[in-house]
Image (cartoon, rainbow, N blue to C red):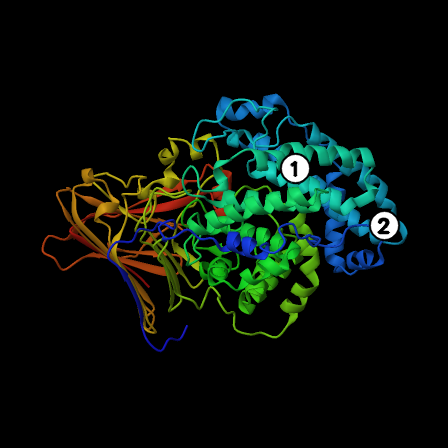
């Protein structure tokens, strides 16, 4: 990116706390109150994420107009499901989370059941609009959907075992209470799915089934939402997170796709507006997702989903909110932390492959007026679908395609995305290779130039999904990883328990940070950076931070300052650490995805891929570095192996005293 002058930011002490933004935001609540001042119960417009599968000519034409490859994909997915029996969830499967901590056995079957219904719905829409042999698939598809709907309605609980608690951060209850439905992420997702079935199938779904589904949605979703109080709704039990918008979006979808009355819908919107305002109040105005790029799909994009419902049903009230700068910042965050196609700076519980962009990113970009992001999303969607990959998944959980409305939005946007992807090249707007960004709410800086993409976290520990990684650096050069963050492994009971930071992926010594006589960072908000200074310039960018208090007092630190400088003209990155204190030896740890190779004749140089790492002490008299060691880290977790396409990572250990300089070329 060419700049005419340096841009400099500084703070005396970065709070890195999105909730510390001053007054509470009332964007949605004020709009709702203002729009209803004259007529409290003005009718809502219909919510139509795409055409239903009915006999209306316009709706049939919409399904027939789908790109042939997409219609074929929907039919193929449904056909693949019918080769297997329906999964069943038993009490034994539920109890496994409490017995041995395993989440995957239950959640895999849970997701497969719902994915099958969603895929069947899309295939049914294609078949219902078709003429000839394809139309004959409707009967089998409808029966399969009714099977799935019935199985889901028969489940005693729609929440996950790992979420079975009514009070935030308390132990999960061993069994669900059928008399008090609990609204977690996936109970709300289930509500959306069944409401979408009512919408897509219309009168093709037998009346007794429709009546049962509507009754279950009222009992399990709407009544608890309006009559109970869950922590994720906001203004109670601490700050909000991705749960707030994820659940709110799906409750709104349920209320407006299922046949609920005006009073009910009005009450749902009122409560939803308060929750969305709580989410925005706890979210940085800069749009940064503190939980990491992987959670953009379930935070920023779910905010989009909730806004899309509200703007569709009351455009006079909510349509203007797309122009708010705060909303635009949330929308475009994902491009500002993008390294390349499905490669992201992965601080917090985020995989480096945070997820392919698709219709929701495209539609969000269109809504806020960012053409560059819309084009990037359209291109990535086209490449992904052409390769048979899925852009409608939820990367944070692996429960892909259980949200039927995401599929309906994809169907509705497919033609426009193809047109955009086929259009002439133009600047990528907020593309991953051209924007340097400082996110003060989280203390994350992104520097780019000279072939480098560099992310630095100068924030704090101890927030939702965070690791003990204050001060850590992620470095990519020419599109290849040099210094990495491993990410998080498969979620288990331990991941969100008091033993979370016993997991190696969460510990500071498995990030690009030192320990001091073996003392690592802690998971408390007091472990933070201060005196942060960030400068972006045409020839050089840098960030410096005082990391003294990022370690506990037992580390023996009197002072520790890290400065990261990117020289774009020279194509070099320098990490300079100056540490003083009563500790004996500091050991710098550097994590790589490729095996470091020693450079012949040079005891302090290593090659990582095509990059050269050179390490030396500072000019201070007491500075020295000890023998460098390299240790492999076998990846026993299947998710981490898939994230890095490898069976091991590598850690470089550099003992030092006083100061250490690491230069990457």
In the figure, is residue 354 to the left or right of 455? right
Q: Residue at x 41, y 31 (%)?
A: 497
Quadrant housing residue 81:
top right
Find disc 1 in the rendering and name its residue: 112
Q: Quadrant of the N terminus?
A: bottom left
Under tag 2, what secondary structure? helix
Residue 311: horizontal and vertical position, in percent?
61, 57
Report crowding for label 1: few under 14, some 14 to 19, many 20 or more residues within 10 A (C-alpha): some
Residue in the foreground of this view, choosing between 387 and 299:
299
Residue in the foreground of this view, choosing between 478 and 275:
275
Could you tell me if residue 642 is visible in this image?
no
Under tag 1, what secondary structure? helix
Query: Farthest bottom residue?
Result: 4
Residue 195: horizontal and vertical position, in percent?
70, 42
Q: CA distance from mark 2 to mark 1?
A: 25 Å
Q: Tell me if residue 176 comes above or below residue 639 in the rendering.
A: above
Query: Farthest right residue?
Result: 132
Q: Residue at x 51, y 49 (%)?
A: 276
Find disc 2 in the rendering and name its residue: 134
Could you tell me if residue 102 is visible in this image?
yes
Say which label, 2 or 1, has the lower sequence index.
1
Residue in the foreground of this view, choosing between 414 and 267:
267
Q: Residue at x 46, y 55 (%)?
A: 344
Residue 391: horizontal and vertical position, in percent?
61, 52
Query: Farthest left residue?
Result: 621
In the figure, is residue 24 to the left or right of 193? left
Report crowding for label 2: few under 14, some 14 to 19, many 20 or more residues within 10 A (C-alpha): some
Q: Tell me if residue 418 comes above or below residue 357 in the rendering.
A: below
Query: Farthest front residue?
Result: 38
Residue 20: horizontal and vertical position, in percent?
35, 50
Q: Which mark is residue 302?
A: none
Q: Quadrant of the C terminus?
A: bottom left
């Amino acid at each position: 990116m060419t700049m005419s002058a340096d841009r400099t930011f500084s703070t005396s002490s970065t709070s890195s706390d999105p909730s510390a933004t001053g007054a509470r935001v009332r964007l949605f609540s004020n709009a709702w109150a203002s729009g209803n001042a004259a007529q409290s119960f003005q009718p809502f417009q219909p919510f139509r994420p795409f055409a239903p599968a009915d006999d209306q000519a316009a709706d049939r034409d919409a399904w027939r107009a789908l790109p042939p490859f997409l219609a074929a994909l929907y039919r193929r997915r449904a056909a693949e499901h019918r080769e297997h029996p329906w999964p069943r969830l038993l009490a034994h499967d539920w109890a496994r989370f409490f017995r041995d901590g395993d989440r995957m056995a239950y959640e895999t079957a849970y997701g497969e059941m719902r994915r099958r219904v969603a895929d069947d719905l899309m295939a049914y829409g294609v078949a219902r609009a078709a003429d000839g042999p394809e139309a004959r698939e409707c009967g089998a598809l409808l029966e399969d959907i009714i099977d799935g709907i019935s199985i889901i309605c028969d489940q005693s609980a729609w929440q996950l075992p790992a979420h079975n608690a009514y009070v935030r951060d308390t132990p999960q209850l061993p069994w669900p209470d059928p008399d008090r439905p609990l609204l977690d992420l996936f109970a709300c997702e289930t509500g959306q799915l069944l409401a979408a079935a009512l919408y897509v199938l219309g009168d093709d779904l037998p009346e007794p089934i429709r009546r049962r589904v509507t009754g279950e949605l009222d009992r399990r979703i709407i009544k608890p939402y309006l009559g109970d109080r869950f922590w994720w709704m906001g203004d109670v039990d601490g700050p909000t997170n991705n749960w707030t918008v994820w659940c709110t979006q799906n409750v709104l979808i349920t209320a407006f796709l299922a046949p609920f009355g005006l009073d009910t819908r009005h009450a749902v919107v009122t409560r939803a507006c308060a929750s969305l305002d709580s989410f925005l109040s706890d979210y940085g105005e800069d749009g940064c997702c503190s939980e990491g790029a992987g959670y953009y799909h379930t935070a920023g994009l779910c905010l989009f989903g909730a806004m899309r419902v509200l703007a569709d049903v009351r455009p006079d009230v909510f349509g203007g909110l797309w122009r708010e700068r705060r909303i635009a910042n949330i929308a475009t965050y994902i491009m500002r932390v993008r390294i390349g196609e499905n490669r992201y700076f992965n601080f917090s519980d985020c995989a480096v492959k945070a997820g392919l962009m698709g219709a929701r990113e495209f539609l969000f970009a269109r809504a806020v007026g960012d053409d560059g992001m819309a084009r990037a999303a359209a291109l990535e969607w086209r490449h992904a679908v052409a390769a048979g990959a899925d852009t409608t998944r939820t990367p944070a959980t692996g429960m892909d395609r259980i949200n039927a409305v995401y599929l309906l939005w994809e169907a509705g946007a497919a033609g426009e995305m193809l047109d955009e992807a086929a259009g002439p090249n133009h600047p990528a707007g907020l593309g991953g290779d051209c924007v340097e960004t400082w996110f003060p709410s989280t203390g994350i800086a992104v520097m780019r130039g000279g072939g480098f993409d560099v992310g630095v976290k100068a924030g704090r520990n101890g927030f939702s999904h965070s690791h003990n990684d204050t001060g850590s650096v992620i470095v990519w050069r020419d599109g290849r990883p040099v210094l990495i963050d491993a990410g998080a492994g498969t979620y288990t009971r331990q991941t969100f328990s008091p033993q979370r930071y016993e997991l190696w992926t969460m510990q500071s010594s498995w990030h690009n940070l030192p320990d001091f006589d073996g003392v690592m960072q802690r998971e408390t908000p007091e472990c933070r950076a201060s005196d942060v200074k960030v400068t972006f310039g045409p020839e050089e960018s840098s960030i410096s931070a005082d990391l003294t208090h990022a370690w506990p007092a037992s580390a023996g630190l009197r002072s520790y300052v890290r400065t990261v400088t990117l020289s774009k003209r020279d194509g070099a990155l320098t990490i300079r650490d100056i540490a003083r204190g009563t500790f004996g030896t500091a050991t710098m740890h550097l994590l790589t995805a490729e095996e470091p190779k020693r450079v012949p004749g040079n005891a302090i140089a290593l090659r990582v891929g095509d990059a050269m790492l050179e390490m030396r002490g500072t000019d201070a008299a007491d500075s020295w570095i000890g023998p460098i060691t390299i240790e492999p880290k076998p990846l026993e977790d299947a998710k981490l192996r898939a994230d890095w396409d490898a069976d091991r990572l590598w850690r470089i250990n550099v003992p030092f005293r006083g100061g250490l300089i690491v230069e990457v070329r």
